[in-house]
Amino acid sequence: MTVKKTVRFFLNGRDEERAIAPETTLLELIREDLELTGTKEGCGEGDCGACTVVLGELVGGSVRYKSVVACLTPAIQIDGKHVITVEGMAQGQELHPIQRAIVDAHATQCGFCTPGIATSLLGLYLTKAAPSGQEVHTALAGNICRCTGYASIRRIPEFISRQPDAPEAMRPAYLDATEDKLRALGDASARDDILIEREGQIFFAPASVDSLRTFVAERKGQPIQFVSGGSDVMIGVKKRRARPPCLVDLTRLASMKEIRDTGDRLTFGAGVTLVDLAEATRASLPILGATIAQMASHQVRTMATAAGNIANASPVADAVVLLMALDATLHLDGPDGARDLKLDELFLGYKRLALTAGEWICAISIDKGRFDAVDFQKASKRQELDISSVNSALALELDNGGKAIRKARLCCGGVGPTTLLMKKTSAFLAGRPFAEATFVEAAEILATEATPMSDVRGSADYRRDVMKNLLVKHFVSLSANAAR
Ligand SMILES: Cc1cc2nc3c(=O)[nH]c(=O)nc-3n(C[C@H](O)[C@H](O)[C@H](O)COP(=O)(O)OP(=O)(O)OC[C@H]3O[C@@H](n4cnc5c(N)ncnc54)[C@H](O)[C@@H]3O)c2cc1C
Ligand code: FES
Ligand code: FES
């Protein structure tokens, strides 16, 4: 496989090829290099949605569209993709149906958030011709408006539906031709590796696992920062001024985007995004989607992965607490070969992992059929787009028609330096009746099992109380589900 030093992509239907510096975000590329300033920078950390753009990507022969936050997307990740910005919506003087609806609904004032709202909706309407109210809510939950008010913004779909030509006009005129070009370009894994070196920094984006293995073996013992969605990595680079000497992007590896469900066992590649994981397990493991729906925003979930959530090692990571309760296994690869590791053995301390230098997560698997009842609970200040103060997941094996607990795995986040498997409380629950009194008693044991710290999201006492309450809430939620 040959190596290339430039990135080829399409921008609003136009062919582009650029040499890009390793740490450049898509937002910097769009605004500074390509001089398209319609896409705005608000927070620069994924929280406001002002920088939302749409990416078109070839998946299994057809082009899929998704909205992403450009401020956290590594620009190099757009190789072989179609970037649609707000400038790509109107055709000449003719506004796009979404833009017309924004005008008609009086859904803009200062206009700063408006491009992001328009592109978030474009990402939605390019995938669903007639989205439901909940789908519109989900698509817009990551877009903050400081002046207009959300009532008029939420009426945009109503004004779209009043336009007779909206369904045909939704797809910009250049989309068909660009889709043909994307198909001609082929799958990322069929293209060259990308290697960009600048000022002592390396950015490598392998097109195959073999290339990745070779690259990592050549740098054995040296620090490598892997990049999946980049939603955590880019915050470190842009906000905390981290300057990793070697970034290795894993998003072009097709094998890491596979999902295998054999009925009892679910295995998903480390490159599967949160949105795709939720979609793939909607019927077979709905708790996963319900948990993912409470993480970040739609634009972040279309980029972010569960592997990134795990390896980021945040003590309040939401996917981690659930996957640990489900006793997930990590499938690893690296300079010393492949191995498996239980997720509950990964965290050695605050942000310290039992991974060797250059070792990466290839896939994650769970024994789907093992547990009879699983629940996730999150306490945060807002319902949308907020990090947990405390989170908790409980997986139960039940006996006696659901009346007795055979085995339990309770995991909590936000009450210690890492997500914790609460062994004492889990052992206490085993063999007891599945009843409120059991959980109330178990909550007192739980209170002795972790020593939370005070920080901006809550005092130690608050966290302990919330942790106890979430345990009882697991019982309430599981009994309500059982009664349905
Ligand atoms: C606005 C916003 C809101 C958020 N809200 C939430 C929330 O509500 N709940 C929550 O839990 N999280 C939240 N997050 C955190 C973040 O989105 C998640 O942690 C996400 O899952 C990270 O995935 P990623 O693929 O983007 O990771 P990346 O940023 O690519 O990587 C994260 C870390 O994992 C490492 N890594 C990535 N892939 C691999 C691999 N295959 N093998 C080994 N190491 C790897 C990277 O080197 C890095 O250290 C939020 C983030 C943002 C920006
Ligand atoms: S600038 Fe706020 S999400 Fe990107
Ligand atoms: S219109 Fe001003 S921020 Fe939304």
Image: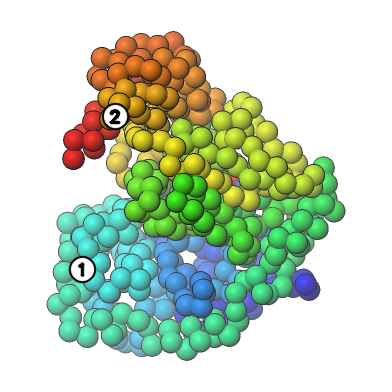
SS under mark 1: helix
Q: Position of residue 480 (x, y in %)?
A: 21, 34
Identify which amino acid the numbered label 1 is placed on.
Pro
Query: Residue 30: where, in percent of width, then height?
Result: 52, 69
Quadrant in the rendering for residue 127: bottom left
Marking on residue 402: 2
Find the distance from the CA under tag 2 to the CA under tag 1: 44 Å
> Is 251 left or right of 366, judged from the image as shown?
right
Position of residue 216 relative to residue 68, above or below, is above
Depth check: 30 or 1 in front? 1
In front here: 163 or 200?
Answer: 163
- The residue singled out by tag 1 in the image is 157
Instruction: Identify the element where label 2 is drawn.
Output: helix
Q: Is 121 placed left or right of 78 in the picture?
A: left
Furthest toward the right, the residue is 218
Name the residue furthest front: 400
Rendered residue at 44%/37% (across/down): 370
**Residue 240 seen anywhere in this rendered image of the structure:** no
